[in-house]
């Protein structure tokens, strides 16, 4: 066998090796770290001095599938009493990874902010909201919700939007009921509409 | 270059024609290639078609005398008979340009044109001896009897042994020998396009447009087809990246090429499945085989985006080892945020680093080439295009542009892409006999694609899509060429692929891990006689795809088989030396891609949930393409018309449904199949009004219909044309390029749009561009200077084929300075 033929054999062997040694990896289950599966609104009635009155109660929106195609989220109806003031805190949770995302939002407070829209605040307002976060950033993880003494309606909608990567200095962005929130840039991490009933 | 160099201008076509087709040579920016036996077969392709010829170090003086005879005028006789013929290389059937044909008895001669054709007119009936000479080839002597006007013959010239040394030829070669419509970008036009990505560069060819995602991601579109329906060849290896994604640009650096060729026909038989709409061949110059050294430097700067681009190529041939040559090339590119009229597009920077190198050896019987290329790119995706849900998307569409004005920075943040593509190949051929050649080519590719989304906290450091794709390709084929009119190629082709999601993304993978194997067998034969060439081919392919992925902790697998026969028939006829007609009828197919089969997830840019269908069948298409080319003294014209019915065309269709989640609402899209009909035409023409003034015009129209329900498909290019005028300052005393060109691009509104698009097609627009090019000689070296102003009036516009038309206006004015220096 001359050298040329040897070279060819070598090349063929090389190719055979490369082909046989190249297979895809076995797939690994991937837990969706980014997904939010549960959003809980916790209400604690407070008096004029800010002291807690009675025991807290909560309403949850959840979607165990996260963002994947599947069942629609279940959203509980928020029930509040006329003329009362509540401290509302929001908890955000990923049940797939068993991860509390609330802390992350707090840590990245400079790029997250909740907005509260819907008829409860806008067209037939009977709720009002003031940011009451720990620290200087307006985030909306904690806030004060006041219900009117004698509202014209008893049912409405509260749309809770969590914006990410927005320009917090945009004019109007400090208003929790800022309808033009999109103008401040960024994107929505959450956009849930809770039915609200006042008694 | 040595001193006894002769430069001879054979003929000069209109130098303004931005693109010429199949072989119309207008390469003022020529390259050098050393010419030698068997060198030709080294690259698939070879055809010397040049405006300029250089002959160096001639031991024999044949060619000089041959060329001197060029201007020989034919004088009139009463006899009106003529002979026609074609001259091609015996070895590979490629036409020989500028061979000299002499009929001694009649004292009549001719020189073969770029297609190898010649005509000798005004002959009386009788017996003649015909002599054909071409440098480095054995002289052909043929005796014939001329009685009627139908005499026509193909001559195959055999190369002489290695005795003849180092002849340098400058010029253009065809990248592929086919009877279908082919257009190439090379020479001056390629030089003008330097600094642009592959898709943008190819817009210079009529019938080619782009499907883009912002300004840094542009996928070439041939006759309305892109992504997996066309193929890109990097120096003979089919480029295998994640080309299914609309926002996945081809992983190739145009700087590695000295010629980019677009084959507009269905070429499944020659190139394998997926080459339905066409093939793009990105080819470096052939390697030198004798002592040689040349370095070329490109420096490019652009005002918009503060883009800087550097490219360096060195080509060398060794003196000590005859037949050994090498090339090494590297380029780097950096740009920052792009400016639209009035604002900066946030996070649209780009960083690219590319390398390529080859080493080749060529002797009379054996040719070997090793090649490696690296493409590395990191690019930012427009910040505002990353929408959280449908309401976000609707808000920005209504706004028509990003909410903030942005500012200039080179910084690239999330969302971004990081792509690395390695390609290595080994190619060899061996001449078993005078007429039989065996070829072997092996290619290895590794594509690593990472896409980073805007996420929370530490997740920002993790890619949300992290794919590694290995591809092995193996080609074994034989070529046969004989002294008779028949030649052909028979071969087998093997493609093996392994795709893996790299774990740890924290996102359910968009596409599964898979193993794919494709085996193809093909045969093509070509018959040439005189001005006629007829070509036919057939191919069988079998493909198996094995997939696996976890969704919600549940393993889902699939094992799918696809097979298909494809065939083509094509012909080319030289009606006269100036006028050529070609027609090609080919079938093609494409198995469904994994994303079409298995997509299941959220697409942030489109606020869409895309759902694949594992039961999709292969697409089958027929493409009939016809081209008429006229190449006169002052006029160059080409018309291409095609008809392309496709059975089971796969497309992403909005279901009209929405999906509600805690994050908001999303549109749901699903992959469907329908019968489609694509048809249209391209045209290109140029005319020299005077020595100084010339003009060109080109354009294309694509029609694409869903024949099932008589609707339109999304993202089909709208009607467009491009025209311009040039004024040349070059004088007879100083013939170097020195000209200014004003051009105008007109793009119509896409009125043939589907009903369910998230935003209506943008209005028509017109752009004006200015370009000045000048060539300077510095000693023996050459420098090309270019100053270009794109979008002179800073026009605000959106292009239908840019997916970011939902979010922003296109790029504003851009001033570019391009320097090319060869030494």
Image: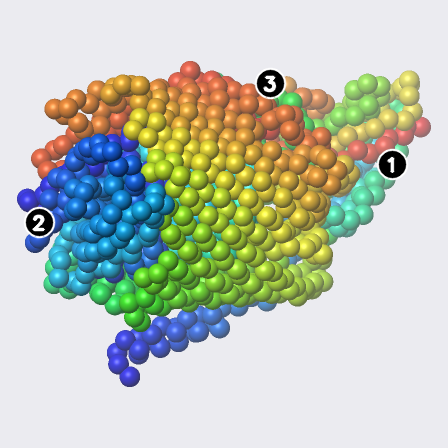
SS at badge 3 = loop
| Comparing labels 2 and 1, the label whose residue is closer to the camera | 2
Q: CA distance from mark 3 to mark 1?
A: 32 Å
Q: Position of residue A98 (x, y in %)?
A: 70, 54
Residue B694 visible in the picture: yes
**Marks 2 and 3 in Cβ contact (< 8 Å):** no
- Against B135, is A41 above or below? above
Q: CA distance from mark 2 to mark 1?
A: 97 Å
> Earlier along the polypeptide chain: callout 3 or callout 1?
1
- The residue to which callout 3 is attached is A171
Q: Position of residue B773 (x, y in %)?
A: 26, 26
- The residue to which callout 2 is attached is B61
SS at badge 2 = loop
Q: Which mark is residue A88?
A: none
Q: Position of residue B558 (x, y in %)?
A: 67, 64
* Residue under the image location 48 percent in, 19 percent down: B766
- Name the chain letter of the residue that bears numbered label 1: A
Q: Nearer the viewer, residue B50 or A84?
A: B50
Q: Nearer the viewer, residue B250 or B550?
A: B250
- Name the chain letter of the residue that bears numbered label 3: A
Residue neighbourhood size for the residue with mark 3, other residues' Cα within 10 Å, grouped as few (<14), some (14–19), many (≥20): few
SS at badge 1 = loop
Q: Nearer the viewer, residue B482 or B702?
A: B482
Q: Position of residue B299 (x, y in %)?
A: 26, 35
- The residue to which callout 1 is attached is A77
Report the colour scheme: rainbow
| Comparing labels 2 and 3, the label whose residue is closer to the camera | 2
Residue B788 located left or right of residue B4? right
* Quarter of the N terminus of chain A within the rendering: bottom left
């Amino acid at each position: 066998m001359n050298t040329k033929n040897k070279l060819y054999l070598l090349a063929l062997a090389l190719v055979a090796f490369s082909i046989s040694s190249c297979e895809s990896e076995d797939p690994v289950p991937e837990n969706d770290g980014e997904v939010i599966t549960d959003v809980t609104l916790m209400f604690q009635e407070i008096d004029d001095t800010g002291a807690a009155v009675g025991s807290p109660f909560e309403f949850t929106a959840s979607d165990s599938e996260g963002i994947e195609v599947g069942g629609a989220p279940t959203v509980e109806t928020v029930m509040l009493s006329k003329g009362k003031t509540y401290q509302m805190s929001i908890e955000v949770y990923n049940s797939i990874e068993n991860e509390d995302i609330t802390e992350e939002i707090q840590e990245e407070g400079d790029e997250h902010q909740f907005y509260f829209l819907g008829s409860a605040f806008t067209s037939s307002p009977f709720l009002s909201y003031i940011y009451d976060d720990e620290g200087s950033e307006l985030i909306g993880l904690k806030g004060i919700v006041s219900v009117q003494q004698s509202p014209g309606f008893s049912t409405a909608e509260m749309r809770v939007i969590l914006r990410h990567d927005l320009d917090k200095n945009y004019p109007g962005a400090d208003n929790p009921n800022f309808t033009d929130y999109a103008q401040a840039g960024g994107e929505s991490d959450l956009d849930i509409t809770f039915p609200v009933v006042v008694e | 270059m040595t001193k006894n160099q002769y430069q001879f201008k054979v003929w000069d076509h209109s130098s303004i024609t931005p693109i010429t087709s199949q072989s119309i040579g207008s390469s003022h920016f020529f390259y050098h290639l050393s010419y030698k036996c068997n060198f030709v077969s080294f690259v698939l392709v070879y055809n010397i078609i040049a405006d300029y010829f250089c002959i160096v170090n001639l031991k024999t003086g044949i060619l000089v005398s041959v060329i001197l005879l060029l201007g020989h005028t034919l004088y009139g006789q009463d006899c009106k008979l003529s002979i026609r013929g074609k001259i091609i290389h015996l070895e590979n059937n490629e036409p020989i340009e500028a061979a000299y044909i002499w009929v001694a008895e009649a004292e009549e001669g001719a020189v073969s044109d770029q297609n190898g054709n010649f005509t000798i007119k005004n002959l009386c009936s009788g017996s003649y001896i015909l002599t054909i000479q071409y440098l480095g080839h054995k002289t052909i002597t043929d005796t014939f009897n001329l009685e009627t006007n139908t005499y026509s013959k193909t001559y195959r010239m055999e190369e002489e042994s290695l005795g003849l040394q180092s002849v340098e030829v400058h010029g253009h070669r065809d990248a592929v020998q086919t009877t279908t419509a082919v257009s190439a970008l090379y020479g001056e036009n390629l030089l003008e396009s330097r600094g642009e990505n592959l898709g943008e560069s190819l817009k210079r060819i009529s019938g080619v447009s782009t499907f883009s995602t912002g300004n840094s991601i542009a996928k070439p579109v041939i006759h309305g087809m892109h992504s997996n329906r066309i193929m890109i060849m990097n120096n003979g290896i089919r480029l295998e990246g994640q080309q299914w994604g609309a926002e996945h640009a081809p992983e190739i650096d145009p700087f590695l090429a000295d010629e980019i060729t677009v084959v507009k026909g269905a070429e499944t038989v020659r190139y394998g499945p997926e080459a339905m709409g066409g093939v793009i061949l990105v080819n470096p110059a052939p390697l030198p085989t004798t002592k040689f050294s040349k370095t070329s430097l490109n420096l490019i700067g652009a005002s918009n985006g503060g883009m800087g681009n550097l490219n360096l190529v060195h080509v060398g041939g060794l003196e000590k080892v005859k037949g050994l040559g090498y090339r090494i090339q590297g380029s780097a590119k950096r740009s920052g945020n792009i400016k639209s009229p009035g604002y900066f597009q946030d996070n649209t920077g780009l960083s690219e680093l590319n390398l390529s190198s080859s080493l080749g050896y060529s002797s009379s019987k054996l040719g070997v080439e090793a090649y490696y290329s690296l493409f590395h790119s990191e690019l930012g995706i427009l910040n505002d295009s990353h929408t959280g849900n449908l309401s976000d998307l609707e808000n920005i569409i209504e706004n028509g542009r990003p909410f903030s004005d942005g500012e200039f920075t080179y910084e690239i943040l999330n969302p971004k892409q990081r792509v690395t593509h390695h390609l290595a190949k080994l190619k060899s051929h061996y001449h078993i006999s005078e007429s039989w050649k065996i070829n072997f080519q092996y290619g290895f590719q590794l594509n690593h694609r990472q896409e980073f989304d805007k996420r929370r906290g530490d997740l920002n450091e993790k890619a949300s899509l992290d794919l590694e794709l290995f591809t092995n390709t193996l080609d074994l084929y034989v070529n046969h060429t004989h002294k008779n009119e028949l030649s052909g190629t028979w071969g087998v082709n093997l493609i093996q692929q392994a795709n893996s999601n790299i774990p740890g993304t924290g996102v359910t993978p968009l596409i599964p891990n898979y193993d794919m194997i494709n085996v193809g067998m093909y045969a093509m034969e070509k018959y040439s006689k005189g001005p006629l060439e007829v070509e036919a081919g057939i191919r069988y392919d079998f493909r198996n795809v094995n997939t696996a992925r976890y969704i919600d902790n549940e393993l889902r697998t699939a094992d799918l088989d696809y097979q298909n026969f494809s065939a083509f028939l094509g012909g080319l006829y030289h009606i006269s030396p100036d006028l050529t007609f070609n027609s090609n009828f080919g079938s093609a197919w494409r198995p469904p891609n994994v994303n079409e089969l298995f997509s299941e997830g959220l697409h942030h840019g489109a606020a869409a949930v895309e759902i694949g269908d594992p039961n999709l069948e292969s697409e089958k298409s027929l493409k009939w393409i016809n081209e008429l080319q006229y190449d006169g003294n002052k006029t160059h014209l080409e018309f291409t018309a095609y008809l392309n019915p496709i059975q089971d065309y796969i497309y992403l269709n909005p279901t009209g449904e929405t999906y509600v989640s805690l994050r908001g609402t999303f549109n749901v899209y699903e992959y469907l199949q329908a019968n489609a009909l694509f048809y249209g035409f391209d045209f290109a023409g140029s005319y020299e009004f005077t020595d100084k003034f010339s003009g060109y015009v080109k354009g294309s129209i694509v029609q694409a219909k869903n024949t099932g329900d008589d609707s339109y498909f999304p993202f089909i290019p709208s009607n467009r044309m491009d025209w311009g005028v040039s004024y040349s300052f070059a004088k007879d005393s100083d013939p170097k390029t020195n000209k200014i060109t004003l051009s105008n691009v007109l793009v119509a509104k896409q009125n043939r749009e589907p009903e369910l698009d998230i935003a209506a097609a943008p209005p028509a627009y017109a752009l004006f561009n200015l370009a000045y090019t000048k060539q300077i000689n510095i000693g023996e070296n050459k420098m090309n200077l270019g100053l270009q102003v794109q979008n002179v009036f800073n026009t605000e516009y959106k292009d239908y084929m840019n997916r970011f038309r939902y979010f922003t206006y296109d790029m504003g004015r851009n001033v570019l300075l391009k320097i090319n220096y060869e030494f």
